[in-house]
Image (cartoon, helix red, strand yellow):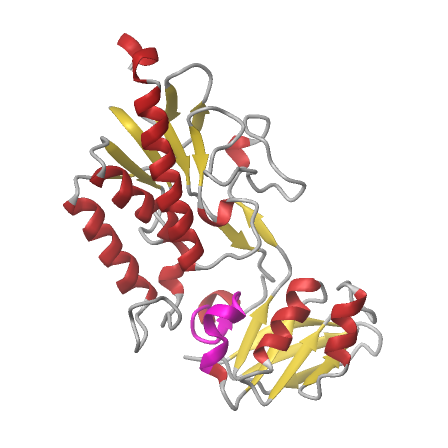
Amino acid sequence: MRYDVIIIGAGPAGLTAAIYAARSGMHTLVMEKSVIGGKITLTEEVENYPGFEEGIGGFDLTEKMQKQAIRFGTEFLTKEVTEIGLEGGCKIIGTHDANYRAKSIIFCAGAYPRRLNVPGEEKLTGRGVSYCATCDGALYKGKTVAVIGGGDSAIEEAMFLSRFADKVYIIHRRDTLRAQYIIQQRAFKNPKLEFVWDSVPQEIKGENKVEGIEIYNRKTDKINLLHVDGVFIYVGMLPNTGLLESKVELDSAGFIITDEYMQTNIPGVFAAGDIRSKILRQVITAAADGAIAAWSSEKWVTEHEDEFGAEI
């Protein structure tokens, strides 16, 4: 139960970190509370990851990553982390029934989109309901989609979607956008965008794929059905940093602040992937973060080896 590095989270960032750490000779453990691969496993087809010209399923991609990590000696453990001790040289990771010790830690627990919590959303996630236009936008060429939200991300992603879709509805609960003025002006000039004001989603319709979205107008008190092929939801992201509050430095939205080496404000503690404060959250950027974090972790452990002594 003693490791050179413990990686918390087995999404693309954690799996890549494991590949690099284990390959460098570090005794490596990856801890994941649920599904190996993280939320990318819900994506039916990843079209923009280099090397797969015809695309690859999210589950298939991360399965390959895990097998590669295992080949280099990575250990995997399906357990939920309930406690974290970062004081001193040795870091302690607690679960419901055991403690694990490591010289370094890489947090890769990711972030998750804020949900609408309306009927149909969960059932149709990955089958027309998406939280990433960059990931899935190209699948909607010539189709009609709806974007939920009125902030910068919602409007920017709606404009991105307009490169592929014939029509993009922007559904916003207010009669004005929250996005920056310059972004709004660009959106208002886009002929493919249609704004649906003062409205909130009631239900996402469809059996095996999205067929429409039912919306409620807060001013007219009427319910309408929009026929769409996809629904993109942008009502905020929530990082999985609950156990880290007051332990590592976070930004105003709760994401971990790191330097270019993925180092947090605590020596020997690194972060990678969507849990970081960063501008782009994609599989490829998560993998890049993981590689850098593992490299930095190995260098840090090597440089401080004499300080651990019998503690580890």
Q: Residue at x 30, y 17 (%)?
A: 305
Q: Residue at x 61, y 78 (%)?
A: 146
From this view, report whether residue 138 is shown above or below residue 269: below
In x, y percent, where is residue 131?
A: 53, 65
Residue 100 visible within the image: no
User: Picture coordinates of residue 203 (x, y %)?
Assistant: 60, 73
Percent across and percent down for residue 33 are: 36, 42
> Is 5 one of the magenta-colored residues?
no
Residue that appears at 45% across and 21% down = 86
Q: Is residue 113 left or right of residue 183?
A: left
Asked whether residue 139 is in view, the answer is yes
* 172 over 262 or under it: above or below: below
Instruction: Name above or below for residue 306 compared with residue 171.
Output: above
Q: Quadrant of the N terminus?
A: top left
Which residues make up the magenta segment?
Answer: 125-139
Identify which residue, 72 or 208, lies in the foreground.
Answer: 72
Total marks in image: 0
Q: Position of residue 34 (x, y in %)?
A: 35, 47
Place residue 85 in its image quadrant: top left
Which quadrant of the figure has residue 277?
A: top right
Quadrant including the C terminus:
top left
Vertical order, 114 against 9 (above or below): below
